[in-house]
Amino acid sequence: MRQHPPKKILYVDLDNTLVDFQSGIDRLSAADRSTYRGHYDDAPGIFGLMDPLPGAVESFAELTGLFDTYILSTAPWDNPSAWTDKLLWVKRHIGAEPGSPAYKRLILSHHKNLNNGAFIIDDRDKRGVKEFIGTHIHFGRPGLTTWAEVMDHMRPLA
């Protein structure tokens, strides 16, 4: 019996990659927008207010069929609700039950380079992305500004 090679490991960031961060800012109260201006990620509850980027949820589901796929995100150190809100966002938008694309596949870390894998899709090169051993697929750069473009890039790499 012929065995298939294992799938390559892929990590996908949340903020401004799967998640529309601005949509959370837009839903903050005027008082919170004023209080947290310049550091919105510290606003309690903001990560529960965000929408998925267009095509992100469907693309993530497809990627799980092509790669051994995980969500790899950083939660702000000074915003304890962010840790819970990110998990609840994944459950609400991608699935909470066994068998759903992100079930128990959320990793929160300030050191993304400690994870081994072939690829990371992230909009920034911070929090260890620059030191990540695999290939950084820089979401938002020319040719990778939409999930349709990212998927066209990723399918041949599987």
Image (cartoon, rainbow, N blue to C red):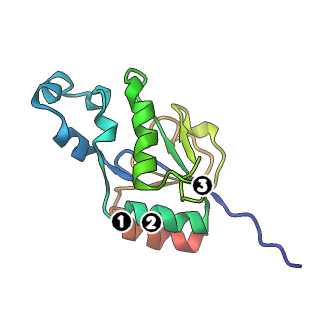
User: Disc 2 or 3, which lies upstream in sequence?
Assistant: 2
Helix, strand or loop at disc 2? helix
Please, is residue 49 above or below residue 11 in the view? above
| Quadrant position of residue 39 | top left
Residue 128 screen position, x and y as percent: 53, 36
Furthest residue in direction right, as rendered: 1
Q: Mark 1 points at which residue?
A: 55
Residue at 53% of width from left, 34% of height from top?
A: 109
- Nearest-to-viewer mark from 2 and 3: 3
Quadrant location of the N terminus in the rendered image: bottom right
Q: Residue 59 carries which label?
A: 2
Question: Please, which residue is most extreme toward the bottom here?
Answer: 1
Q: What residue type is labelled 3?
A: Pro
Residue type, label 2? Ser
Which of the two residues, 108 or 120, is positioned nearer the viewer here? 108
Alpha-carbon distance for marks 2 and 3?
19 Å
User: Answer yes or no: do the residues labelled 1 and 2 have beta carbons within 8 Å?
Assistant: yes
- Which quarter of the image is occupied by the C terminus? bottom right
Q: Mark 3 points at which residue?
A: 98
Pointer 2 and pointer 3: residues touching (CB < 8 Å)? no
Above-or-below relation of 53 to 127: below
28 lies left or right of 44: left
State the image coordinates of residue 110 (x, y, percent, origin top left): 51, 31
| SS class, disc 3 | loop
Give x and y (percent) for residue 118: 63, 55
Q: Which residue is located at x 39 percent, y 31 percent?
A: 82
Quadrant location of residue 29?
A: top left
Q: Establish if 105 lies above or below 66.
A: above
Point out which mark residue 94 bears. Answer: none
Q: Residue at x 50, y 51 (%)?
A: 96
Q: In the rendering, at what x and y percent does residue 8 appear? A: 66, 61
> Which secondary structure lies at badge 1?
loop
